[in-house]
Image: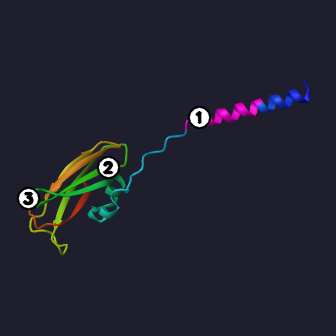
C-alpha cells in the first residue's frame, strides 16, 4: 500500500467518523419551568413549606376582570417530579393595602399527576378586590 493510498484511506475514515458524529441525535434535556410569562406575577405565588417548593411550581398566572367587575385568577400548577403529588391550594384575596379580604378563601385539594400541570381557577367574592396571593401547601 502506497503513501497515497494510506492518506486517502485515512481521509475517508475521518470523514465517515465526522459524519457519524453529526448524525447522532442530541440527548433530550428534561423540561424546565419557564418564568418567561410570569415574572411580574411571581410575587403572587407563595409556597408554604420546603417539601411543597421542591414538588410544585407555578408556571403561569393569568388575571382577568369579569363582566361584573370581579377579579378572576387562573393558576397553572406543575408537578416537578414523576410521582403524583397532592396539595392544598388557596387564593387569598386582598384589599388595596394588602390586608386579607373579609372572606378568606377555603383550601382546595388538588392532585397532580407526575410531570404534568393542573389549572386552578379562583374568582374574587367582591369587585373591590384588586390583589391576591395563591398559597400552596402539602396535604
In whole angstroms, how far apart are the C-alphas of marks 3 and 2?
A: 30 Å
Left or right: residue 59 versus residue 30 is: left
> Which disc, if any, is residue 78?
2
SS at mark 3 in the image = loop
Left or right: residue 106 versus residue 30 is: left
Q: Quadrant of residue 51?
A: bottom left
User: Camera-side residue: 136 or 35?
Assistant: 35
Question: What residue is rendered at 11% in x and 60% in y?
Answer: 70
Judging by the rendered image, the residue that carries numbered circle 3 is 68
Colouring style: rainbow
Question: What residue is rendered at 60% in x and 33% in y?
Answer: 23
User: Camera-side residue: 72 or 79?
Assistant: 72
Judging by the rendered image, the residue that carries numbered circle 1 is 24
In whole angstroms, how far apart are the C-alphas of marks 1 and 3?
A: 57 Å
Q: Which residues are magenta?
A: 12-25
Few, some or many C-alpha atoms within 10 Å of disc 1 (few <14, some 14-19, many ≥20)?
few
Magenta span has 7?
no
Of badges 1 and 3, the one in the foreground is 3
Task: Give the percent coordinates (x, y) of residue 113.
Answer: 30, 42
Most frequent secondary structure within the magenta stretch: helix
| Residue 139 in view of the camera | no
Magenta span has 16?
yes
Which numbered disc, 3 or 2, marks the residue that appears first in the sequence?
A: 3
SS at mark 2 in the image = strand
Amino acid at each position: 500500500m502506497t503513501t497515497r493510498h494510506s492518506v486517502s484511506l485515512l481521509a475517508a475514515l475521518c470523514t465517515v467518523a465526522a459524519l457519524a458524529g453529526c448524525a447522532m441525535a442530541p440527548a433530550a434535556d428534561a423540561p424546565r419551568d419557564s418564568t418567561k410569562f410570569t415574572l411580574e406575577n411571581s410575587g403572587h405565588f407563595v409556597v408554604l413549606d420546603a417539601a411543597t417548593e421542591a414538588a410544585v411550581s407555578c408556571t403561569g398566572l393569568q388575571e382577568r376582570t369579569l363582566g361584573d367587575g370581579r377579579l378572576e385568577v387562573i393558576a397553572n400548577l406543575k408537578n416537578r417530579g414523576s410521582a403524583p403529588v397532592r396539595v392544598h391550594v388557596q387564593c387569598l384575596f386582598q384589599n388595596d393595602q394588602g390586608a386579607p379580604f373579609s372572606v378568606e378563601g377555603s383550601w382546595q385539594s388538588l392532585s397532580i399527576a407526575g410531570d404534568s400541570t393542573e389549572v386552578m381557577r379562583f374568582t374574587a367574592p367582591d369587585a373591590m378586590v384588586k390583589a391576591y396571593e395563591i398559597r400552596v401547601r402539602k396535604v
